[in-house]
Amino acid sequence: MLACRPALLILDEPTTGLDAHEQRAVMDLLLSLTERGHAVLFITHAMDLAAAYAHRVIVLDGGRVAVDAPVAEAFSRHDTLAQARLHVPPIVQLAARFGVYAGSPAALAAMLTDTP
């Protein structure tokens, strides 16, 4: 599918059945595609992947759009996510305690160790 150089990729649960290493490899590939100008839409229940890789999050609940926002804003809507039976990843919760948004442990570590 990538050989056709599509402008938009839509992937439903692209990491299902993969171990953590394989998940990162797939998501890093998708990230590199976005850096080269492709649009990628991925559908997932893996909130840790959405937190780490998405730029924007759309949450559907009962067939309606409950959230359509940049990733940090989307994950700040705890009640709306809970109503949709989704959970904010622990790393996002921890980062919020520091007053920042971080979708991965590496991103949080970089923020906390970055000195001016």
Image: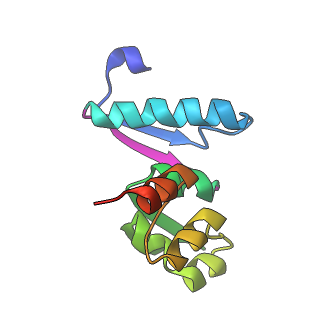
Left or right of residue 99, residue 33 in this image: left
Q: Residue at x 60, y 55 (%)?
A: 48
Q: Residue at x 51, y 39 (%)?
A: 11
Q: Indicate the quadrant where residue 7 lies.
A: top left
- In magenta segment, residue 42: yes
Q: Residue at x 46, y 62 (%)?
A: 112
Question: x%, y% of residue 115?
Answer: 34, 59
Q: Residue at x 55, y 31 (%)?
A: 26
Q: Quadrant of the N terminus?
A: top left
Left or right of residue 14, residue 107 in this image: left
Question: x%, y% of residue 2?
Answer: 41, 20
Question: x%, y% of residue 12?
Answer: 57, 43
Left or right of residue 92, residue 17 in this image: right
Q: Is residue 116 above or below residue 44?
A: below
- Residue 79 appears anywhere in the view: yes
- In magenta segment, residue 66: no
Q: Farthest residue in the bottom direction? A: 79
Colour option used: rainbow
Q: Farthest residue in the left direction? A: 37
Question: x%, y% of residue 38?
Answer: 30, 34
- Residue 63 appears anywhere in the view: no
Q: Quadrant of the C terminus?
A: bottom left
**Magenta range:** 37-45
